[in-house]
Image (cartoon, grey):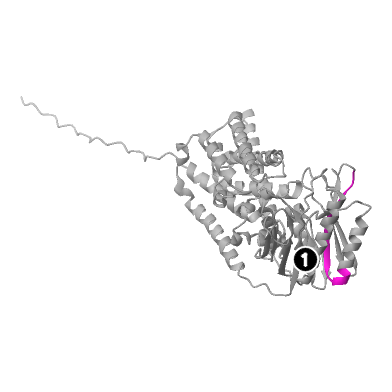
């Protein structure tokens, strides 16, 4: 009997399991949410106003966006709001100096922080519903819309606009001639949104192309501005003088009649000096003197004599108390020409708490022998809509009698020159207690004069008076309207998803 040996069993070689690729955790997770809040406070406190660190504005929103991604619930949102409030009150405190009280800081910072919180919380809700692709479009849109709404509908004007963090970047500021303040808001917000996304993404390479597009937009804006500021502005020039007084006015603490008379004599002496130096238009600073309702006609008559005798235009800016305590008053200017009074203008936008009776005068353009000119008073030119109206009426020069303080010097004057870039006209801003300035339609400096230096208080400059056509003067806030459309589209999609999710929860077998 033979025994057969069974064939050997086939041995299946062991197959090593396929290893999953190791995905590194996002860089943002290396810091806890609390440290992102602290970083957000530090960055945002350093940006804007006095001692502005302009480069940080491009990433100032990154810590807030990352904190929103890492957290949920009302406690986390409350901590974020507290951090926003701390950052903004520090930021606004940088412009506090005598005679401005510290209460001014929360007066501005509370609504600023509330607006920022509203935008951030709304953005994160939409991003979680719609995804990061929509998020990259929605965050810039929200920032633009909030800035636009603030400058159009609130009495805080355009303060806090992203463009003002780039106040010394003249090439970048030229984008305001295309799309107003919204262009710089869109660019800085897009860079922040992309940076936060890359730091938070487990696959940051997915967003490199998007980053390249954003980078190209920033470079295009800088290239456009770098070329534009070398444009030769042709056309006639006019010599303008800004005459600045030494008299400091505080509501309820007005000087006596002797001090006012001495100040008036000094103002008219400086006006005569400006005329001798060749000025064809002389402009006093905001509230350069004080007069009572009974004496106002005498002040204007004195100015008219100077205008007629010298053949110049003279803009008298002064304050007229309307109650015995001096807490209510008219803040106005009277524009005089050799042929008589051509305009009486009341400040349209008193600073919150100022006490001035707001005017409703729309602001007109005067066609004078030397050019088309218009005027506004100080804070009025923190509202882009007035500059846009002047541009569309054909102004080639706008004079802005002003009064500031050390904490916003020369920041506030530099803000006003952006109205000229937007609208394509020169801006002359004589200022008490800060820096007076004269700029052409490209924001280029023609002259400056510091109130804190030992000088004769007469700013003299030759400025162009031929208007420069700008796209912004034609299309206005079209970019802001486009951003509003994007935002409404995102909200509509998100609400549609919410309705769909609720329907599925309530009626799971409906399909």
Magenta region: 307-323
The residue tagged with tag 1: helix, strand or loop?
loop
Q: Position of residue 368 (x, y in %)?
A: 83, 70
Q: Quadrant of residue 498?
A: top right
What's the residue at 6%, 26% (across, down)? Answer: 2
* Residue occupying the far left of the picture: 1
Taking 498 as reference, is 257 left or right? right
Frontmost residue, 192 versus 408: 408
Taking 79 as reference, is 390 left or right? right
Taking 216 as reference, is 455 left or right? right
* Residue occupying the far right of the picture: 294
Q: Is residue 12 magenta?
A: no
Taking 340 as reference, is 495 left or right? left
Residue on which disc 1 sits: 395
Q: Position of residue 299 (x, y in %)?
A: 89, 59
Q: Is residue 311 magenta?
A: yes
Give the number of marks: 1
* Residue occupying the far top of the picture: 1
Q: Quadrant of residue 511?
A: top right
Q: Position of residue 242 (x, y in %)?
A: 75, 62
Q: Quadrant of residue 495?
A: top right
Q: Position of residue 106 (x, y in %)?
A: 69, 38
Dot 1: few (<14), some (14–19), or many (≥20) neighbours within 10 Å?
many
Frontmost residue, 222 versus 367: 367
- Does residue 250 appear anywhere in the picture? yes
Where does the N terminus fall, quadrant-wise? top left
Frontmost residue, 361 versus 453: 453
Asked if 178 appears above or below 122 in the picture, the reply is: below
What's the residue at 53%, 59% (across, down)? Answer: 216
- Does residue 391 appear anywhere in the picture? no
Asked if 183 appears above or below 365 in the picture, the reply is: above
């Amino acid at each position: 009997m033979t025994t057969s040996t069974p064939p050997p069993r086939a041995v299946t070689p062991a197959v090593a399991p396929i290893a999953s690729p190791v995905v590194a955790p996002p860089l943002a997770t290396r810091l806890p949410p609390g440290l992102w809040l602290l970083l957000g406070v530090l960055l945002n406190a350093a940006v804007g106003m006095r001692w502005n660190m302009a480069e940080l504005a491009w990433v100032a929103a990154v810590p807030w966006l990352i904190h929103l991604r890492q957290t949920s619930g009302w406690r986390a949102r409350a901590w974020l709001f507290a951090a926003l409030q701390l950052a903004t009150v520090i930021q606004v405190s940088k412009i506090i100096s005598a005679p401005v009280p510290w209460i001014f800081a929360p007066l501005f910072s509370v609504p600023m922080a509330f607006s920022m919180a509203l935008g951030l919380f709304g953005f994160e809700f939409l991003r979680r519903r719609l995804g990061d692709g929509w998020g990259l479009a929605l965050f810039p849109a929200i920032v633009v819309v909030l800035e636009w709404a603030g400058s159009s509908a609130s009495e805080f004007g355009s303060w806090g606009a992203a463009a003002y963090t780039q106040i010394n970047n003249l090439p970048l500021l030229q984008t305001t001639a295309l799309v107003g303040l919204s262009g710089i808001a869109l660019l800085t917000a897009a860079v922040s949104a992309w940076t936060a996304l890359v730091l938070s993404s487990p696959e940051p390479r997915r967003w490199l192309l998007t980053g390249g597009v954003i980078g190209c937009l920033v470079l295009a804006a800088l290239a456009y501005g770098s070329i534009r500021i070398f444009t030769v502005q042709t056309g006639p020039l006019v010599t303008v003088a800004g005459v600045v007084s030494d008299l400091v006015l505080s509501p309820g603490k007005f000087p006596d009649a002797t001090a006012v008379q001495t100040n008036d004599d000094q103002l008219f002496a400086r006006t005569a000096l400006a005329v001798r130096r060749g000025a064809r238009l002389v402009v006093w600073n905001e509230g350069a003197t004080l007069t009572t309702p009974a004496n106002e006609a005498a002040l204007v008559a004195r100015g008219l004599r100077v205008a007629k005798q010298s053949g110049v235009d003279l803009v008298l800016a002064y304050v007229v108390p309307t109650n015995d305590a001096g807490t209510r008053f008219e803040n106005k200017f009277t524009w005089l020409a050799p042929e008589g009074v051509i305009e009486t203008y009341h400040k349209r936008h008193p600073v919150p708490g100022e006490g001035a009776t707001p005017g409703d005068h729309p602001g007109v353009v005067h066609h004078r022998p030397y050019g088309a000119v218009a005027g506004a008073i100080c804070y009025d030119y923190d509202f882009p809509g007035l500059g846009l109206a002047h541009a569309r009426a054909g102004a080639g020069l706008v004079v802005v009698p002003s009064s500031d303080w050390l904490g916003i010097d020369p920041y506030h004057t530099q803000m006003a020159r952006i109205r000229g870039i937007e609208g394509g006209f020169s801006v002359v801003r004589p200022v008490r207690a800060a820096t007076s300035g004269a700029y052409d339609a490209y924001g280029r400096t023609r002259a400056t004069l510091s109130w804190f230096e030992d000088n004769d208080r007469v700013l003299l400059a030759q400025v162009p008076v031929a208007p420069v056509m700008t796209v912004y003067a034609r299309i206005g806030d079209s970019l802001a309207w486009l951003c509003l459309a994007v935002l409404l589209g995102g909200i509509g999609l998100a609400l549609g998803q919410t309705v769909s999710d609720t329907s599925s929860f309530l009626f799971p077998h409906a399909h």
